[in-house]
Amino acid sequence: MKDNDEYLEFAKSLAEDAGRIMKKYFLAEEMGLEIKSDNSPVTQADTEINELVVQWVKSRYPDHGVMGEEDSFGLDKDVMWIVDPLDGTYSFAIGIPPFAFSAALVEDGQLRVGVVYDPITKRLLWATIGQGAFENGKKLDITDKNLTDNLLISSWVVGGIENSIFSDKSVHGETAGAYAQTGRIDEIDLPIAYGLAITGSGRVDGLVSSIKTPWDVAAGSLIAMEAGAKVTDLFGNAVKRWDKEANGILAAAPKLHAYLSETIKSVLESAKNENNRH
């Protein structure tokens, strides 16, 4: 394996080209919108960016694989680029930011490099393992972030969709109710990878999600962790491999992580039990 810095620069270059493709199609009269078999949307930007990543990786690192939301190759490789070409396609398709490009490099299931890029704000967030996280060159550190009376959480705990760990649709409302009972938590709905990265930047206080797909969680989780966040699955357990489906994701500064985990614990256990009954 080469140096992480080389892979980081490669990922940043991918992000910049992905951003140009997004801006080409954003608000275009024809963006090639289609609905996939799981009822999620896909646009021409999604497929072009995924194809770009596959082509670049095959050319530059032919011994690596790509796990992409729209297309993959070499899934048996030990080294994998895990890519969400357009994190936030729903927002993109209706002309409302935010949305982002997300790419992580994983070796034997462990994170090495992560990049998330928002082409509208030109916000580039990145991290390499053991080297910290950055936003447009500014080092991020949320380690000592404390519990306050006003918390803003990016939350996407849902049931009954293909990429969620829960089958029960009521988990969404019950989670929102648990937040409301605290009197201190407000929700914002951000795309998962972007929300994780923004948690690392400190712009939101945490991310709580029942989404399990690797391309949604890998890159943003590394950025959040390297910025000082505690990142676990939704039930507080370590994520053992980032190239496999996660059991949801929960990210926040250590003190906030414990608070969020306790706040929604009963809701999550109830939803998990409901899964087990089916």
Image (spheres, rainbow, N blue to C red):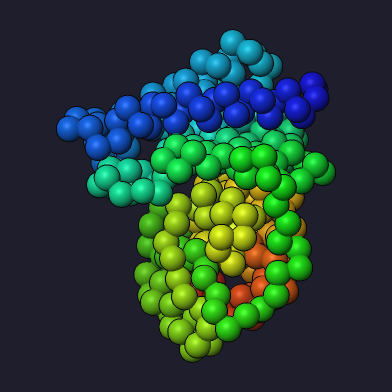
In the rendered image, which quarter is residue 188 located in?
A: bottom left
Residue 3 drawn at (x, y percent)? 80, 25
**On screen, residue 187 above or below 125:** below
Residue 194 drawn at (x, y percent)? 51, 49
In depth, the one of 198 and 4 nearer the eye is: 198
Report whether residue 195 is seen: yes
Q: Quadrant of the C terminus?
A: bottom left
In the rendered image, which quarter is residue 205 located in?
A: bottom right
Residue 181 drawn at (x, y percent)? 49, 89
**On screen, residue 225 above or below 250:** above
Residue positioned 60% across, 29% down in the render: 12
Q: How many numbered discs?
A: 0
Residue positioned 65% across, 65% down in the render: 252
Q: Quadrant of the N terminus?
A: top right
**On screen, residue 78 above or below 196:** above
| Residue at the outermost top position | 59
Residue 144 drawn at (x, y percent)? 76, 68
Q: Is residue 188 left or right of residue 135?
A: left
Report whether residue 230 is seen: no
Q: Is residue 115 left or right of residue 186?
A: right
